[in-house]
Image (tube, rainbow, N blue to C red):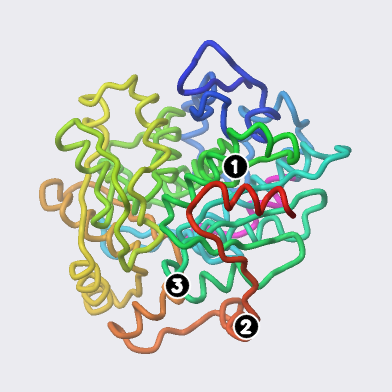
Amino acid sequence: MRFYSTKNKNSTVDLRTAVLQSLPPDNGLYMPETIPELSDAFLKNIQNLSFQEIAIEISNFYLSEDFNQDEIEQLIRHAINFPAPLFSLSEQLHVLELWHGPSLAFKDFGARFMAAVMSRLVEGSDQKLTILVATSGDTGGAVAAGFLRVDNVDVIILYPSGKVSPLQEKQLTTLGQNITALEVAGTFDDCQALVKEAFLDNEVNQRYMLSSANSINITRLIPQSFYYFEAYKQLKDRSGDLVFSIPSGNFGNLTAGLLAKKMGLPVHQFIAATNVNDVVPEYLDKGEYLPRPSVATISNAMDVGAPSNFRRMEDLYGHLWKDMKQDITGYAYNDVQTRSAIKEIKEQYDYVMDPHGAVGFLAARAYQEWHPEANVIIMETAHPAKFLPVMEPILGEIPVPERLSILSKREKMAHSIGIGYGEFKEWLLGR
C-alpha cells in the first residue's frame, strides 16, 4: 500500500518510508492511499472470529505488499496478545476496557504493533533506528514497554515535567537499556513541537535514522482500529445505533475509529470527549479551529492544545466542517465534573473508572439524554491505579496491579531540558 501526505496527495511513499520516516518532509501526516472496505460476510461472521483473527484480516490490507501471510500472523500473535473486554454498565451503556496490556493503557495496542513492524523493517540495517516520542502520560509507558530490548532500536521519550502521574513517570524513566527519558520543563505541546522540529532538521537526520512512536506515525492508528471491531463483536444486541465515546487528547484514538467506519464498521456517531482542552469540540460547534496552549488537568493524557491528528480528521472529511460535524459530536468537562463522575460511576455501577474514562462517561450520558436507544461504548483508556493521587482522595484505596507496584522502588533516570529546540538539538548531537 502507498501513503500520501495530508499536504500533498500527489506524492506517495511505500510502507517502509511512511513508517520509518513518520513525518513527511512537508510536515503533513501520512495517510493510506486507499482505505480498504471489509466485506459484508466479514461483519456478519464477526462474532465467530477471535480478536487476533480480526486484527489479521485488517492488517492484510495494509501490510501484505511488504509482509507475507506467515509474517503478518506472527506479528499479530506477538503484538495483540491481550484482550479488550466489553463491560456493560447497563443495556445501552458499555465500557471497552483497553488497559489489559503491559503498560495498562490503550496505547499498548499501537506501541506493540509498531515495534513489531519497525523491527522487521530495520532488519539487516547497518544504522540503528532512533524513536523520538512525546508523551502526555500513557504513550511513553506503552512505547517503553513495546520497544524495550528490541534489536537495533533506541527510544528517546520526551515528557512534560510535573504533568504526568508518578506511576506513569516511573513507567518511562526506570527501564534504562535502549530507553532514554527526557524531562522537559514545559507542556506536552512543547514536547511534541521538539519532536516535530527534529524530524525537519537536516543535520539531525544526517546523524540519526529517526522515526516516531506518536500517533503522527500511521502504524499507531492501524492497530487502534482493531478494537473498534472487537467492541462491535462483543455487543449482545446490535439493534441500536452504534456510538463510541472517546476520551480525546491528540485524537489518534478517534481517528482510528474513523478509519474503522471507512472500512465498513456501522458506526452511527463518534463522541469527542475532552477536558477543558476543548479545541476540537469548539471546532465542531463553531467551525473554527483555534489551537492554543494546553491547560493542566487531572485527565493529563488529554492535555493537548494542538492535536496533531486533527489534520487527518480534516483530510478524511475533505476539509468539510459540516460533514465532520455530522459524524462527530463534541463535549468538554472540567476537573470538578470529572471527579464527580468518578464517584458517581462507583456508587451507581460499582465500577472504578480512571479520570479519562470518566470524561468519556460524562459525554456518553449527555448524548444518551437525547438518544436513549443508542448503544454507547465508552473507551476506558487506562487502569485507574495509574492515577492514585487523583483517584484515592475520591474513592479511597485503589488496588495496584503488581506490574505497577514494583515500579515504586525503582530509581528514576531522566535528563532535564528546557523547551528550546537548540538545547534539545545540542543534546541529540552530543550523545
Single out the residue that lies furthest toward the top: 10
Q: Residues within 10 Å of mark 2 (few under 14, many from 20)?
A: few
State the image coordinates of residue 425 (x, y, percent, origin top left).
Answer: 62, 47
User: How far apart are labels 3 and 1 at the CA level?
Assistant: 31 Å
User: How far apart are labels 1 and 2 at the CA level?
Assistant: 32 Å
| Residue 55 badge | 1
Of residue 94 and residue 362, the one placed in the foreground of this image is 362
| Quadrant of image for the C terminus | bottom right
Residue 355 part of the magenta-drawn span: no
| Residue 165 badge | 3
Q: Amino acid at mark 1?
A: Ala
Task: Write down the region rendered in magenta.
Answer: 75-85
Q: Residue at x 26, y 57 (%)?
A: 275
User: Vertically, is 103 above or below 397?
Assistant: above
Of residue 354 and residue 235, the one placed in the foreground of this image is 354
State which mark lies toward you, 3 or 2.
3
User: How far apart are labels 3 and 2 at the CA level?
Assistant: 16 Å
State which mark lies toward you, 3 or 1.
3
User: Vertically, is 239 above or below 263?
Assistant: below
Q: Amino acid at mark 3?
A: Ser
Q: Quadrant of residue 283?
A: top left
Q: Residue at x 52, y 32 (%)?
A: 42
Of residue 119 and residue 381, the one placed in the foreground of this image is 119
User: Vertically, is 59 above or below 65?
Assistant: below
Proximity of marks 3 and 2: CB atoms separated by less than 8 Å = no
State the image coordinates of residue 368 (x, y, percent, origin top left).
Answer: 17, 52
Of callouts 3 and 2, which one flags the residue occurring earlier in the amino acid sequence?
A: 3
Of callouts 3 and 1, which one flags the residue occurring earlier in the amino acid sequence?
A: 1
| SS for dot 1 | helix
State which mark lies toward you, 1 or 2.
2
| Residue 406 badge | 2
Proximity of marks 3 and 1: CB atoms separated by less than 8 Å = no
